Image (cartoon, rainbow, N blue to C red):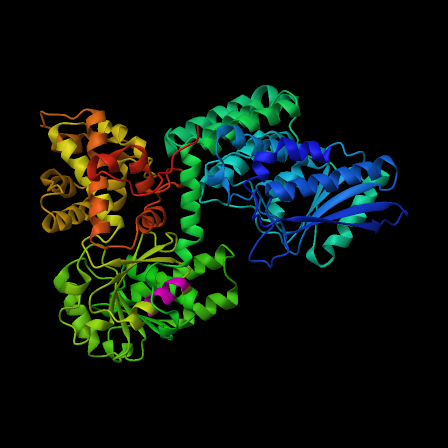
Amino acid sequence: MTNDTRARFSALLDISGDEVVTHSFVRDVSLPTGKTLALLTLDNGKDHTRPNTFGPIGLIELDDALETQRERASRGEIAGLAITGKPFILAAGADLSKVNDIPSREVANLLPQLGHHVFGKLEDLGVPTFVFINGLALGGGLEIGLNANYRTIDSSAAAIALPEVFLGLVPGWGGAYLLPNLIGIENALKVIIENPLKMNRMLKAPQAFELGIADVMFPSARYLEDSIAWASGVIEGAIKPERKNTPGKIERMVKWDAATGIARKMLESKIGTVPVAPYKALDLLKAAKSGTKAEGFAREDEALADLIAGEQFRASVYAFNLVQKRAKRPAGAPDKELARKITKVGVIGAGLMATQFALLFVRRLQVPVVITDLDQERVDKGVQTIRSEIDALLAKKRISPDEANRLKALVHGTTDKADFADCDWVIEAVFEELTVKQDVFADVEKHIAPEAVLATNTSSLSVEQIGAKLEHPERLVGFHFFNPVAVMPLIEVVRTPQTSDEVLATAMATAKNLKKNAVITRDTPGFVVNRVLAKLLGEAMHAVELGTSFADVDAALAPLGLPMPPSELLDLVGLRVGAHVLDTHHRAFPDRFYDSEKLHKLAEYGTLFEKDKKGAIKGFDKGALKIISGGREPMSREELLRRVQDGLADEIHRMLDDDVVEAAEDIDLCLILGAGYPFQMGGVTPYLDRVGASERVFGDTFHHPPLLGLS
């Protein structure tokens, strides 16, 4: 049997020579009844920095182990089989490190087939099978449990999920069929589609237990002992688990199709129709209401093979590697040993952005934070805002009462710049106007130590010019957050020609301590994210002013896969801010960035959309449409899309030639983390390669070879 399995999946084994193998170690455990439970522990021999994963070699080893236990069961040597993982980790799913080496769709199809072949044995091994979810269980790590007869879970387990849709895949080792038939269609839609699309949200053990993913939950202190005792009770028939969420006849007849229909409409309204994986997953979940397990698994095989062979998954893997690897080792960063310690932070300003900064710094750095503004009333209001936000965190049980009191005690307000004297880090959050920022920094420099760092949050102004009035411009660095500050993971760290290595190292260390990802950019208009978005919005306004409707512009640019259409992006950033950003770029590059007169008129008018009381968009505002009307040369959707593609390819190529960042990967990382560019697009540069814009514009591609699908 094992030799047949190796032969069947030899094409996968051929590309797995350096796999980090998750081994299957089996030991016998005597049950209170005198019977024997075979306990199989998954362990890749690495520490907790490398979770167990399932590659072809490890799956074949698991298959061997299961076959051995099947034979033992047939001889009456064991009464049950349980699978668990090394401390705190069951498994993190399939090993995707070699997916780019898969040569064809035919070989891609073998990966889901192998998982089904191995995991599927847990249903009818000849004795009851259990999976003890002792910690992290993602993707295939959860699916191995779903294939077993019973599941227990450690109450402290905090990463339970089927995140495949987030990566441009679907649960392909049984999850798309087994989960809805275990916990119901609405719960399965949440776990398989909704959570992955909410920044890859995961379940904690109590949530997984409440959904019915696990049959029973035990505390960590005696988790393994309690799980073994419970398994013994099940084997003896003394325990019969009740599954309250298992779908019944009425759910299958009435709710199933309705739930998937509602989910489809929600997907179309929120993410459009460009992403493939969410809709593949939805189709699998809809089909799971009937038919056999074998039929469900066959559907998963085909869907997963299509996705693995497709462009979006390869782009997703590229994006995932950027976030997991490149973001943690920023290109161009100086020696981290040069970083200075931050013991106190000053924030210039007490408005919305300033209070967000102050809250983030005090929470993450746990150091005193002082804010200042023009008058005491504004300062007091800012301090109260921060304290109210701390109270909100306490109410949500995100922090303890002791921590809330400690954080409040660390926040102070002042109108006296002398209170900034012992700050190691001072960041401004004042009006986006060059002279204002210059004067603010020139004033505060008189009160701070020579080695204190000055950071500006400017989104598009020249950092070097902001420091023009400083006696020590080498202490200035750009530190551009994205809104909302607490949520968005990117900071663009901007180095001027004067910025010292020590200051840059301090900025990078500070970003890390704030739990943000930092990308170093040159001091250039818009840096990375705003320069790319300015190009996009400028082309959108150009088309509108020629007579193209905003609705047609939005539809034309949908293939870019952006998280929202251009009109909604303008509404999100604000019409005045959008006009300011476009003006900044037009002044810097008048031949390439559109000067939009009507965007200024829209900003004066104040709105682009009609909205309901909750702020939801009802449609375009009639007055706004009147302002932008009058053009007589509307562009076709095809013409506009190609113009935008080529414009982005040209601008990004220029940015790389001008060393704004070190590589195309850094631009993609910025857009993924700072603009919500979806994983399945892989960032903007792989997309531009795929559609031929790179070749059209500069006769080459950003990536060699381009991230294309398989035949």
Name the side, left or right, on which 325 lies relative to 144. left
Q: Which residue does the image show at 65% across and 24% down from the upper left?
A: 294
Q: Quarter of the image containing the N terminus? A: top right
The image shows residue 289 at horizontal and vertical percentages of: 60, 23
* Along the viewing direction, whichever of 120 and 477 lies nearer the viewer: 120
Examine the structure image and report whether residue 444 is included in the region drawn in magenta. Answer: no
**Res 118 seen here:** yes
- Looking at the rendering, the stretch of residues picked out in magenta corresponds to 506-512
**Nearer-the-camera pick, 78 or 366:** 78
Q: At x 19% / y 27%, what residue is drawn?
A: 639
Position of residue 100 in the picture relative to residue 536 (left or right): right
Q: Quadrant of the C terminus?
A: top left
Q: Determine whether 329 is above or below 9 in the image.
A: below
Q: Position of residue 468 (x, y in %)?
A: 13, 68
Residue 140 falls in image quadrant: top right
Secondary structure character of the magenta stretch overall: helix
